[in-house]
Image (spheres, rainbow, N blue to C red):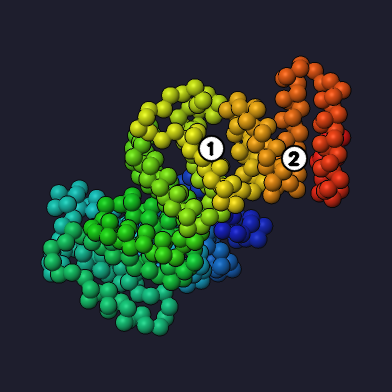
Amino acid sequence: ITKSVTSTGATQSSLGDHLGILLNLPYSSVMPTMATRPIRVNSVLAQVIRFHPKVPGIWIYAAAWEFDQNLNAAAARALMQSGLRACPTSEDLWVEYLRMELTYLNKLKARKAILGEDEGTLIHDVRDADEKQWRDENKELFMALEEKGENDKASDVQNGLSKKKLDFFHDHGLSILRTIYSSAVEALPSNFSLRTRFIEILDATDLTRSEEMRKEILDELRREFSKEPVYWDWLARLNYKSSHEMVNEIIPSQLEKAIQAYEEGIKVVPSAMMFNLYIKFLRNIIVHKNGETRSSVTSSTPAHTVDPISRILEVYEMAEKMGCISEDLACQHISFCLQLGRLEEARKLAEKLCNGKLSDAVDLWVLRFSIEMRCVTERSGSLSKADLQYVFELLKTVLTKMAVWKAESLWLLV
């Protein structure tokens, strides 16, 4: 409960004495003790909700208590729905509500399997005990959270149920996901992570026509968030992760799909952030392949696969050509060359960038001076008077053009 409550913005002191010992113990250690006093726990949770109805984590915990300990799905569902009315903009509440409903369906399906019945395939005009229980307990599920129009919307959902032979779990699971997703998006129309979390849940389930809904969500994301770099980063990683998680190796075809997503993102959103996300992804690939960036220099890359190192260097150059180079990207580019052991290349690059549009970038100048000192030392083994004079004159030129308050780190080099 500590994690659930504090992660949603409430602190232990703000909850006061209502949570008592619950806030000082982990969920796993509290539950066995609490299970022996369910009436007392229910009373405490009711009081906490009464005084702190705007804390989503409390609703989640209370629903989890009813669902896991009291085995009361109807009470858990009612708590979740009440929580959503009190905190309609809580992303965690929407996601946990969906997880709870799908978990409940899984339990129903498992029970049918244990009883030796068919794998959940039902005819809708044959009302067996499970279907009747589902409909009785789930009457409020398909109702809108707002009071207005509840009967109309519930009726629309009920009328839309197919009368053909459908799989009980898969069909109702998709209906639940669609309904909760629609309400969640209506409450949080500009929330990107909410939709991506629904995609993750959808991918983890085996629902009828799930690919159709997955495509709908992906199309919505593209239509509404294609101007955001984070969308393209998420899409690329989704394409790469889809099969990479199943095998512990880099799959060229999936890597190409990820790169294509980043390349398209650069065309749609040409920005320093977009390039930064692209490069970060490629650098993670190098670490995955070799463990260390430097060791990847000597590693061989098959001709038919993408070489992440070469691609990273190309992306840095592309950012510079498109005018999207930032001080951070410039320093990254130079540091990457140093990691690859290309000292002279890094020196020339630093000189070019310092003399260009980033001439007032303090961190870039500090990096350049450190490289200049390193180059001089490696050439002669020690600093001569001429070498020191060269570095001093260069530093003097920069300091005369830059405000004192801005060049503090450069003055420290003097």
The tag earlier along the polypeptide, 2 or 1, is 1
Q: Is residue 338 visible?
A: no
Q: Look at label 2 and name its amino acid.
A: Trp
Q: Look at label 1 and name its amino acid.
A: Leu
Q: Nearer the viewer, residue 140 or 185?
A: 185
Q: Position of residue 230 (x, y in %)?
A: 50, 54
Residue that protrudes farthest toward the top in the picture: 381
Q: Residue at x 39, y 64 (%)?
A: 220
Q: Neighbour class for label 1 at 10 Å: few (<14), some, many (≥20)?
A: some
Q: Residue at x 20, y 53 (%)?
A: 112
Q: Which mark is residue 313?
A: 1
Q: Position of residue 326 (x, y in %)?
A: 64, 48
Q: Position of residue 302 (x, y in %)?
A: 38, 28
**Tally of numbered discs:** 2
Q: Position of residue 69 (x, y in %)?
A: 40, 53
Q: Is residue 187 visible?
A: yes
Q: Which residue corresponds to mark 2?
A: 365
In the figure, 103 relative to 377: above or below?
Answer: below
Q: Nearer the viewer, residue 31 or 145?
A: 145
In the figure, 389 relative to 158: above or below?
Answer: above
